[in-house]
Amino acid sequence: GNSVTQMEGPVTLSEEAFLTINCTYTATGYPSLFWYVQYPGEGLQLLLKATKADDKGSNKGFEATYRKETTSFHLEKGSVQVSDSAVYFCALSEEGTYKYIFGTGTRLKVLA
Amino acid sequence: KAGVTQTPRYLIKTRGQQVTLSCSPISGHRSVSWYQQTPGQGLQFLFEYFSETQRNKGNFPGRFSGRQFSNSRSEMNVSTLELGDSALYLCASRGASGGVQNEQFFGPGTRLTVL
């Protein structure tokens, strides 16, 4: 079946460091891909999305490119801030259905 | 525009009891999905309702059920609670067409603790 695999956390970085959180997926067809962020005590918020191969999603300095050849959707940010500390979830939506499949989440901790 | 609201925010129940959780989607949204979030299993899809019809279902036992009302509000019910049902239950709503590429907006969740 379809699945999403994320790098395990926690990831601890200093402020202004470069961030990469790896995400790979297994899916039939052409899923849409998403990154969601969850701040403490809150629900999930959509960070960015890409709906077809080679699309680049971007928001708030975060970017991810839909790579079909490597089945990946890695999240990157050039310079993280303390306020970016949260849990990040990679997700896909199965083509032809309305189901979302989420990765296990990666906790990011940014130190001042 | 008000966001997705979930009530109650916290619940404590004992094994064998049943529980009902409520979700009010964003005004105009007709699709409501439910997820269970646990440290061990992560986020798992429970089911989705669109215009009062269950459109998709995850791999959960029949103790987990849901429904959607004509105003798009949704309820989730868990009967015969088990310790393993302790989790954060998240509800998400999606835009009018409910298409798969439409963004899901999540509520803050209901934290259920089963003792």
Image (cartoon, grey):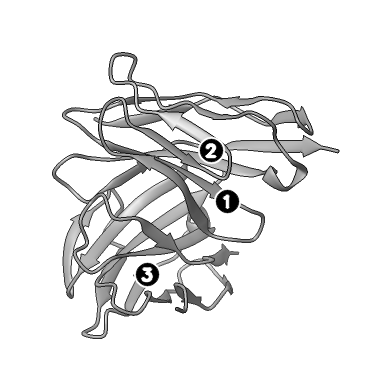
Question: Which quadrant is home to the N terminus of chain B?
Answer: bottom left
Closer to viewer: mark 1 or mark 2: 1
Q: Secondary structure at mark 1?
A: strand
Q: Amino acid at mark 2?
A: Gly
For label 3, count other residues whose C-alpha is less than 10 Å away and answer few (under 14), some (14-19) or many (20+).
Answer: some
Q: CA distance from mark 1 to mark 2?
A: 9 Å
Question: Picture coordinates of residue B62 (x, y %)?
Answer: 26, 60
Question: Which quadrant is home to the C terminus of chain B?
Answer: bottom right
Q: Chain of mark 2?
A: A
Q: Amino acid at mark 1?
A: Gln
Q: Are marks 1 and 2 in contact (CB under 8 Å)?
A: yes
Q: Which mark is residue B79?
A: 3
**The quarter of the displayed image where residue A70 is located:** top left
Q: Residue at x 57, y 51 (%)?
A: A38
For label 1, count other residues whose C-alpha is less than 10 Å away and answer few (under 14), some (14-19) or many (20+).
Answer: many
Q: Which mark is residue A38?
A: 1
Determine whether, in the image, residue A72 is placed left or right of residue B113.
left
| Residue at the disc numbered 2 | A105
Question: Against A57, is B81 above or below?
Answer: below
**The quarter of the displayed image where residue A55 is located:** top left
> How many marks can you see?
3
Question: Picture coordinates of residue B35 (x, y %)?
Answer: 40, 56
Q: Amino acid at mark 3?
A: Ser
Q: Residue at x 23, y 40 (%)?
A: A94
Q: Secondary structure at mark 2?
A: loop
Q: Which residue is outermost to the top? A: A69
Question: Picture coordinates of residue A112 (x, y %)?
Answer: 86, 38
Residue A14 in view: yes
Closer to viewer: mark 3 or mark 1: 1
